[in-house]
Amino acid sequence: MEPTTKARLPAKRSQPVKLLSGGNPQIAKADGDAPVQAYIAAMPGWKRGIGERLDALIVRHVPNVVKAVKWNTPFYGIAGQGWFLGFHVFTHYVKVTFLRGASLQPVPPGGTPKSKDVRWIDIREGDPLDEEQLAEWVKQAAVLPGFLVPRA
């Protein structure tokens, strides 16, 4: 499904969010800001600060961004255009994935031959966060055709 502007709120939870392998929060698949904020709030330790900074940077530079959590990953996109970015918690880092990253300048460093279009950066504890470069990539990525999830 492509990004939409309608938001569905996740079910209220009375118990803590389960952390999956590597500390990745298990958040129910849902569209809108609320599930993304629930994911960020459940990010463990120093990773939560990275999630908060990423979310604020994306919203600041792409005011019409739509959000969702899919596959236990926050995604950011443009309605009718598709998803352009997601981030995911791993044991020792937060992976920020640009779904059309091979088209960005400069090209983000992470990638494999199997990931023709996708590029990423891994942010580890104590790494300086180059917000200026991230902002440039986010602005570039937001105007590219995004990733559309096929309808079932």
Image (cartoon, grey):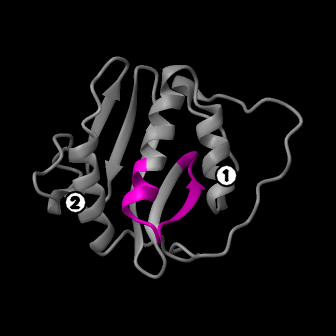
How far from the left and from the top, in percent, is residue 7? 69, 68
- The quadrant of the picture occupied by the N terminus is bottom right
**Label pair 2/1, CB-CB below 8 angstroms:** no
Tell me the number on the disc at residue 133: none
- Which picture quadrant has residue 61? bottom left
Residue at figure coordinates x 49%, y 56% from the top left: 75
Task: Compare residues 149 and 93 and report the one nearer the observer.
Answer: 93
Q: Which badge, 2 or 1, is on the more N-terminal residue?
A: 1
Residue at figure coordinates x 46%, y 58% from the top left: 59
- Which picture quadrant has residue 121? top left
Q: Which residues are magenta?
A: 57-73
Residue at figure coordinates x 60%, y 76% from the top left: 5
In the depicted structure, whether residue 127 falls above or below residue 79: above
How far from the left and from the top, in percent, is residue 26? 66, 38
Tell me the number on the disc at residue 117: 2
In the depicted structure, whether residue 9 falls above or below residue 134: below
Residue at the extreme left of the image, as rendered? 106
Residue type at mark 2 is: Asp
Give the mark count.
2
Q: Nearer the viewer, mark 2 or mark 1?
A: 1
Label 1 sits on residue: 35
- The quadrant of the picture occupied by the C terminus is bottom right
Q: Secondary structure at mark 1?
A: helix
Q: Is residue 1 magenta?
A: no
67 with respect to 29 (left or right): left
In the depicted structure, whether residue 91 falls above or below residue 62: above
Q: Is residue 62 magenta?
A: yes
Label 2: few (<14), some (14–19) or many (≥20) C-alpha neighbours in 10 Å? some
Residue at figure coordinates x 38%, y 68% from the top left: 147
Q: Secondary structure at mark 2?
A: loop
Residue type at mark 1 is: Pro
Residue at the extreme bottom of the image, as rendered? 80
